Amino acid sequence: MKQLLSSFYVAFYLYTSFGIASAQSQTTADTITYAQQNTSQEKLIEAQKYFLLEDFEQALKALKGAIEADPNNDAAYFKQAEVHLRLAQYNDGLKAIENALTLKSNNKYYYLLASELATLGQAPGEVSKYYLQMVNLTNDYIMYLEEIAKHFIAQGKWQQAIEIIDMTAQKTTLSPTQYQIKVDILVNANRISEAKNLLRQLQQKFPREHQFVFQEARLLSLNKEKEKAIELLKAQKQPTTDMQLLLAELQGGKEQAPEDQKLLLLQSFSNPNADARVRTLLMGQYLMESMGKVNLKLVDSLQQVLENDFPDEPMVLENGAITYQILSQKAEGEARRAYALASLERQEQLTQIQPGDFEIWQTLLKQLATWKNWMKLEEQADEALLRFPNQIRFYIYMAEAKIGLEKTNEAKALLRQSLLLANSNPELKSLILSHQANLAYQTQKIKEANDLYEKALAEEPSHPGAILAYGTYLSMEKPQKALAYIEPWIEQGAKNEVIFRIKAQALFTLSEFEKAKSTLEQEFASSSTLAQGETLELLGDIYFEMNDVEKALEFWQKARFSPGVSDQIDQKIDEKTIPKN
């Protein structure tokens, strides 16, 4: 209500101060002398002066004089009600505004003030009364129609709200937004058939207001008329962004979804009015619906078109980073790494455009660590720490890079610093301790590594990364213990790829190659192109030890362009053997 009344008081002051005669009841002109009217007007102006000075006591005294001089001065009663409003004297204010309404019943400002006083006085029944009087006795209330309708809706009086809108429509022309109020009421009252009929009428009445087509389609889809909704949206010659996205959503999950999504995607790129938002959203839906049928080259080319059309647009770059990451997972061979690099490039661009966004840096560093791009990780982690000097996770990424680059002393110093910063966070402490253990293991300090892993797991809660790092360590150093360590997770239905790789690595270390192969192929044979590089490389190693060099090469080749492979992968492929350390 305050929003409605925010500007009308000033306008009304001008009205009362300089046009007082017109604000008075015409029937009193013969009974009140000119001198009385003049005195009343002077007192009203005096009251307004005190009101502006927030001297409400003097304002009420002046208003009392104005009313005594002319008891039929409705504007004086209005100002009296306004003063009582400021003093939170709501009952006194209602008495004053009732006097004003008795004298002049066709002034919308009086009803607005009355309804505010009743609202603040917690008398919803009185508010309804004043709104109904305003609707019936005035003609210029249309700008407050939405607020009036909302009041009756809040009281559960749906039908009364509709009748007020219909009555107003007979008096004047409603805008599409005002008709929208009635649509919303019908939908919320579950009068769906009436809502659909009204939406069709509004489409004829306002052919350029496309939201009514969209709303009918949405309503059809929500009421189990999905095919009708699709038919309606497809019939639109110039579909809006919302229509295109709704159509894509409705077509998703169908047998023909990939082709339907592809068609919508191409249409959006041929539509000069389609903005970056609709194109990126449709591209995302196509990628999700297409599963293994996605046309990688098509998506790649469309992303490049997007970037040409919207250079330096963060949304487009974010879309590129995500899209190329998905393409990398779906691609095979060298294309897999190429798409991953494309994703990283866009992620780096985002850090330049939005350098203060922590999540962008976090995503970039995580991807670089996944691909074991230690030099780039070192460079970007250093930049991230300049911007976020107290972020422990960035210290850890920097330490990972140093470990990967065999900068042992620097890695140790960074991990010590991280441990100090993470002293009150047991989960992060466990992760840092596991990295210290990795570093010790890398430098052949087996006992120290084992002790540090044990410390990492003693933290409660332990970081998932620490748990898996310890399992990986055991799979190579204490394989029997690794099997006992990892089996409970498998029995509980875990599907984490690293868990199965730990089991397979432990079996491989024990020379139980057939069991190791079965462990991995059982879980990942159907989606080997999506597996991590370490998993694919291990499968290749297993086949090699089983004297199936051709199969070993097949998996090493798949691993070659996947994230996480060892430094020896190229040598394995070139020499068709596993290098001896």
Image (spheres, grey):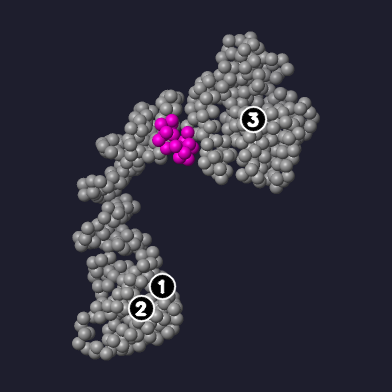
What type is the residue that disc 1 sits on?
Answer: Gly
Residue at x 44% of width, y 34% of height: 307
Q: How many marks?
A: 3
Asked if residue 323 shows in the view, the reply is: yes
Q: Nearer the viewer, mark 1 or mark 3?
A: 3
Residue 79 is marked as: 2
What type is the residue that disc 3 sits on?
Answer: Met
Residue at x 41% of width, y 72% of height: 121
- Tell me which segment is drawn in magenta: 303-320
Asked if residue 524 shows in the view, the reply is: no
Secondary structure at badge 3 equals helix
Residue at x 27% of width, y 84% of height: 72
**Up-down: is 433 above or below 544?**
below
Q: Nearer the viewer, mark 2 or mark 1?
A: 2
With 274 as the anchor, is 510 left or right in this view?
Answer: right
Q: Which residue is disc 3 drawn over? A: 375
Q: Which residue is disc 1 drawn over? A: 121
Residue at x 39% of width, y 32% of height: 253
Residue 546 image point, x, y percent: 64, 11
What secondary structure prevails in the magenta region?
helix
Mark 1 touches mark 3? (CB < 8 Å): no
With 34 as the anchor, is 56 left or right in this view?
Answer: right
In the image, 117 versus 281, the foreground residue is: 281
Q: Nearer the viewer, mark 2 or mark 3?
A: 3
